[in-house]
Image (cartoon, rainbow, N blue to C red):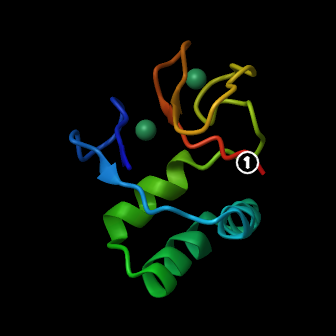
């Protein structure tokens, strides 16, 4: 699916791959360790570009429901725009 974030480039957004539940878990776990490592995994294992990989990593939520850009705590869907700061949150339900 296509996801967009008004704060980030490219403005037209990117195509988000359909990650499986276990891939979402794994990527979140790696992001908590290291964002740079997660970018490398997305490039090497999923064949995404550097830009797409960075875009995805920026928007992965480390804690479900908590906005990755502000202090909003009540995000209740995946791939949601934060109602407070309008940033994209992948907010995966793990
Ligand atoms: Zn963004
Ligand atoms: Zn927010």
Q: Judge: label 1 CB < 8 Å from ligand 2.
A: no
- At x 67%, y 25%, the residue is 75
Label 1: how many residues lie within 10 Å, few (<14), some (14-19) or many (20+)?
some
Q: Residue 37, how many percent across, how many down?
A: 60, 75
Query: Going by the image, does 61 lie left or right of 45?
Result: right
Q: Residue 44, how many percent across, how many down?
A: 47, 86
Q: Can you identify the residue that label 1 sits on?
A: 62
The residue lying furthest to the top in this view is: 84
Q: Is residue 94 above or below residue 24?
A: above
Q: Quadrant of ligand 2?
A: top right
- At x 37%, y 74%, the residue is 48
- At x 73%, y 45%, the residue is 93
Determine the secondary structure under disc 1.
loop
Q: Foreground: 18 or 75?
A: 18
Q: How many marks?
A: 1
Query: Going by the image, does 76 lie left or right of 84?
Result: right
Q: Residue 4, how many percent across, how many down?
A: 34, 38
Q: Foreground: 17 or 69?
A: 17
Q: Foreground: 60 or 76?
A: 76
- At x 63%, y 66%, the residue is 20
Q: Residue 39, how many percent across, how many down?
A: 51, 71
Q: Is residue 41 above or below residue 23?
A: below
Query: Going by the image, does 53 lie left or right of 59?
Result: left
């Amino acid at each position: 699916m296509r996801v967009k974030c008004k704060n980030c480039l490219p403005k037209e957004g990117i195509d988000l791959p359909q990650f499986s539940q276990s891939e979402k878990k794994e990527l979140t776990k790696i992001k908590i360790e290291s964002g740079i490592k997660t970018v490398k995994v997305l490039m090497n294992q999923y064949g995404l570009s550097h830009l797409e990989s960075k875009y995805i990593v920026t928007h992965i939520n480390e804690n479900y429901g908590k906005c990755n850009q502000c202090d909003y705590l009540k995000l209740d869907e995946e791939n949601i725009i934060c109602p407070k700061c309008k940033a994209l949150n992948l907010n995966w339900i793990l």
